[in-house]
Image (cartoon, helix red, strand yellow):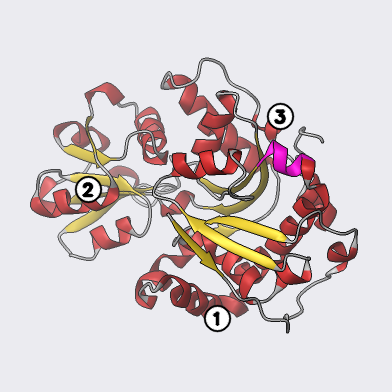
Amino acid sequence: MERRAFVIGAGAVALGSPSVFAQGTAETNRLVLGFGNDPVFAPHMVAMEKGWFREAGFTDVTTKTFAGGAIAGEALVAGEIALWTPGNLPPVSMAHSGIPIVLLGNNAIATTADKLVARKDANIKAPEDLYRIRIGLLQGSTASADIYYLARHYGLDEKRLQIVNMPPPEQLAALNSGNIQAMLCWQPWGYNALKSGTTALVHSGTASGFEANKGAAVQVSYTRSVFVASQEFVRKNPVATRKMMAALVRAQRYVADPRNREEVVDLFCRNTKQDKQLATAIWDDYTFQPAFDQAFANDMKAMTAYLVASGRIKSAKDPLDYTYSDPVAAVDPALVSVPGRFKL
């Protein structure tokens, strides 16, 4: 685990209305963010770089990185971090386990970022060809939900698929060596898998690469990056929660503006030490969209349905029951067309 401190300049760059920041005093000036090196953390980086967290009253902003999502989730509930930004599968699972978390916001739609990549010599032309190859994916991750929905859409028997459980770096090595013939993962691993020229994109999270319906819109991924907090944090810090979300929504809008793309990618690469060519290539796989709308609700329900179908949870809870949309609504009511039902 790594802890980093960011020095936030006093000269914040103005963007949009900061009126939400003036409404009350935050209960704490300290903010600890669960952090990572993925593009989904661009809004966090922008909010820190521009001084918008400081403007909101957070003069002590630090980040912590974790070896795995489960550890980050435990840190959230333990009060070690105020905000966790995972994919949407882990918090759905946690909520069904009785862990007191709330969905605070929709950070980014990442459905396109999921990629099923196969070796060209595997000769995958039709969905049924997947039966005869070994597919690497990290079981229990969003990739498991992808393969479930891919199989269901194309009428495949998921039990006949030869799944090899391994993390993304091992998937790439095994694909290159021929120990597996395909891998299903998120970015940047899909991009890296396609660089060699010896592989082909079989399916993204939103479009087919099979010969019969190549290019057709087929959604098999319901992956989103979401903002998650503990119920304890939001109950103890309602003003701080609202101000934190105001800064993040402001940053999301900045990241989403095409005029800021070059600046944001440069900022991301400086903070993560990642290659700009790679970052630029995968950037459009993420849509920074803060709205609580029907599409958000549908994707969350799809993840829940997968967990029920896979036997990981017994009965489904409505994701809106543990969604706290009031802080985002305080920033801009138009962002909340499907409100959450969690209340303080």
Q: Position of residue 336 (x, y in %)?
A: 77, 47
Q: Which residue is painted at 33% across and 34% down in the image?
A: 139
| Real-space CA distance between mark 3 and mark 2, rounded to the nearest whole angstrom | 36 Å
- Which corner quadrant holds the C terminus? top right
Q: Could you classify mark 3 by the number of other residues whose Cα lies within 10 Å: few (under 14), some (14-19), or many (20 or more)?
A: some
Q: Position of residue 163 (x, y in %)?
A: 23, 33
Q: Which residue is painted at 70% across and 44% down in the image?
A: 293
| Real-space CA distance between mark 3 and mark 1, rounded to the nearest whole angstrom | 38 Å
Q: Could you classify mark 1 by the number of other residues whose Cα lies within 10 Å: few (under 14), some (14-19), or many (20 or more)?
A: few
The label number, if any, that marks residue 125 in the structure image = none
Q: Which residue is painted at 37% across and 72% down in the image?
A: 274
Tell which circle, 3 or 1, labels the residue nearer the N-terminal end: 1
The label number, if any, that marks residue 263 in the structure image = 1
Secondary structure, magenta segment, majority class: helix
Q: Which residue is mark 3?
A: 321
Left/right of residue 67 with respect to residue 193 in the rendered view:
right
| Real-space CA distance between mark 1 and mark 2, rounded to the nearest whole angstrom | 32 Å
Q: Which residue type does callout 2 highlight?
A: Gln
In the image, residue 233 sits, relative to residue 34, either above or below, namely above
Q: Are marks 3 and 2 in contact (CB under 8 Å)?
A: no
Which residue occupies the foreground of this view, 83 or 158?
83
Instruction: Specify the quadrant of the image occupied by residue 57.
Output: bottom right
Q: Which residue type does callout 3 highlight?
A: Asp
Q: Which residue is mark 2?
A: 171
